[in-house]
Image (cartoon, rainbow, N blue to C red):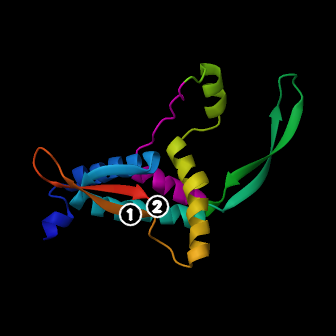
């Protein structure tokens, strides 16, 4: 029974598999996989989301001085991550593979560059700016944490009849 919990893989392979599937789940919103992998993925992804939800509000306002195109110094307020959010961001970055933003259909190259110029890690930004506020609001409404993903049985895979599940974000 213990080998099933470890997906019959060495540690490096298992963690890489979970990292890859969690990245796909958080980027696309759903992933189809076998039942054992789905259960392991659900636990892995929920821990990442919980970490983001607990720390997403920790920001600090900082005034930065920049030189504009005319050579004039301009002061600008910027929101930086606080210590706990920065630690959480780095931990999440170590647990996921980063995904790159892709151009939308019929989007010009200039508008794509303009849309993505301030985003270094699109998946991490999506977790902190989209999922964390959404699930934090859900926690306040329902009064309980967790349950950010669901596992639905899809049926047997055609080649080897393995039970497939759809893991999706709620």
Find residue 170 and name its label: 2
Determine the secondary structure under disc 2. loop
Q: Is residue 157 above or below residue 44?
A: above
Residue at image position (54%, 41%) is 122
User: Residue 43: horizontal and vertical position, in percent?
Assistant: 35, 65
Q: Would you say 146 lies left or right of 10 here?
A: right
- Viewer-proximal residue among 64 and 57: 57
User: Residue 33: horizontal and vertical position, in percent?
Assistant: 26, 52
Q: Earlier in the sequence, mark 1 or mark 2?
A: 1
User: Residue 137: horizontal and vertical position, in percent?
Assistant: 62, 67
Residue at image position (64%, 32%) is 115
**Residue 41 appearing in the image:** yes
Tell me the crowding category of disc 2: few under 14, some 14 to 19, or many 20 or more residues within 10 angstroms, Cα based: few
Are the residues at dot 1 and dot 2 in contact (C-beta closer than 8 Å)?
yes
Q: Would you say 45 lies left or right of 164 here?
A: right
Tell me the crowding category of disc 1: few under 14, some 14 to 19, or many 20 or more residues within 10 angstroms, Cα based: some
Total marks placed: 2
Quadrant where the N terminus sits is bottom left
- Viewer-proximal residue among 147 and 74: 147
Q: Is residue 168 above or below residue 101?
A: below
**Residue 117 appearing in the image:** no
Residue at image position (57%, 38%) is 120
> What span is colored magenta in the figure?
85-105
Q: Is residue 161 magenta?
A: no
Q: Is residue 93 magenta?
A: yes
Name the image quarter holding residue 141: bottom right
Q: Residue furthest front?
A: 155
From the image, tell me which residue sits under label 1.
150
């Amino acid at each position: 029974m213990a080998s099933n919990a470890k997906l019959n893989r060495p540690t490096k392979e298992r963690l890489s598999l979970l990292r890859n599937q969690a990245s796909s789940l958080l980027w696309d919103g759903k992933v189809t996989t076998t039942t054992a992998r789905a259960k392991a993925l659900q636990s892995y992804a929920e821990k990442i989301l919980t970490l983001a939800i607990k720390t997403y509000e920790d920001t600090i306002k900082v005034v930065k001085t920049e030189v504009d195109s005319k050579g004039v110094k301009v002061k600008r307020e910027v929101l930086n991550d606080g210590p706990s959010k920065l630690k959480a961001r780095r931990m999440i970055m170590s647990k996921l593979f980063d995904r790159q933003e892709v151009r939308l259909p019929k989007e010009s190259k200039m508008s794509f560059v303009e849309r993505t110029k301030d985003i270094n890690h699109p998946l991490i930004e999506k977790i902190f700016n989209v999922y964390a506020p959404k699930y934090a609001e859900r926690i306040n409404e329902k009064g309980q944490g967790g349950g950010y993903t669901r596992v639905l049985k899809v049926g047997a895979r055609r080649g080897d009849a393995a039970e497939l599940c759809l893991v999706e974000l709620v």
